[in-house]
Structure formats: structure tokens, C-alpha cells
Image (cartoon, rainbow, N blue to C red):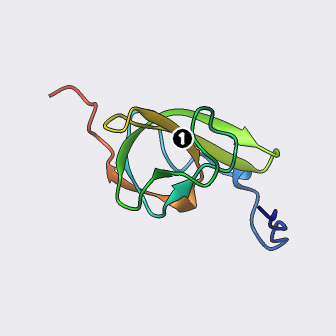
Amino acid sequence: MRERARDPNEPIELEDRPAFEEGQKVRALRDVRNDGTYPGRPMGDFLIRTGDIGYVKSIGTYLQMYYIYGIDFYEKRIIVGMRAKELELVDARCNDPQ
């Protein structure tokens, strides 16, 4: 696969707070394929499909510029790292006590 160059106009996300918090319910806005970094699955295999629902499990950083959200797609039994622009919030209060 060919690597894409970084857009110099893209903001440095780490200058702001993360878009999501641990425990929030999110929806994938695009398909995610294995780029070779997910073990045990063939390269190019679909890991996540648009519309799949998961929960923010962890928040990390990448290249000292971006937040990477570890999303637990529990129904598929898979955790995938995604950027905020690849996700939308479904329910911010799903883990609050009732």
C-alpha cells in the first residue's frame, strides 16, 4: 500500500482536548482494513465496516500530532485504533449510573 503524505493544513489535535472520552459509545464513519498492523488477519481484510458500534477503551497519541482512540468493537471481538474524524458519538452517557 502506498503511504499518504500528511496534509500541512491539518491541525495538530494534541493542542486541544480529546474529542472523545473513555467509555463513550461511538460509530465508525468509514470502513477500516488491515494495513498489516493487525495480527492474525490478512492484509486488506475488513476489520470494521461503516456503521459498526464500539466503545472508547483508550486514548493514545500518534506522531505527537493526533489522538488515536482504541475502540472496542465488542460484537466483533476486536479493538481498533481510529482517529476522531473516523468516528461519531452515539451516546456520551452510556456508562453513567442509572
x%, y% of residue 84?
55, 55
Which amino acid, mark 1? Val
SS state under label 1: strand
In this picture, residue 97 sits left or right of residue 79: left
> What x and y, as percent, mark residue 81?
58, 42
Q: Quadrant of the image for the C terminus?
A: top left
Label 1 CA crowd tier, 10 Å (few <14, some 14–19, many 20+): some
Q: Is residue 25 visible?
A: no
Residue sitting nearer the eye, 32 or 9? 32
Q: Where is residue 91 drawn, in percent x and y?
A: 29, 48
User: In percent of the image, x 61 and y 55: which residue is there?
Assistant: 44
Q: Quadrant of the N terminus?
A: bottom right
Q: How many marks?
A: 1
Residue 46, position as x, y percentages in the image: 50, 53
- Residue under the image location 57 percent in, 54 percent down: 33
Q: Relative to 96, does residue 52 appear above or below in the rendering?
A: below
Question: Which residue is found at the position 28% from the left and 31% from the top?
Answer: 95
Left or right position of 91 against 71 = left
In this rendering, the answer to whether 48 lies above or below 69 is below
Q: Which residue is mark 1?
A: 80
Residue at screen point 53% across, 59% down? 86
Q: Is residue 56 visible?
A: yes
User: Which residue is outermost to the top?
Assistant: 97
Q: Residue furthest front?
A: 42
Q: Nearer the viewer, residue 70 or 24?
A: 70
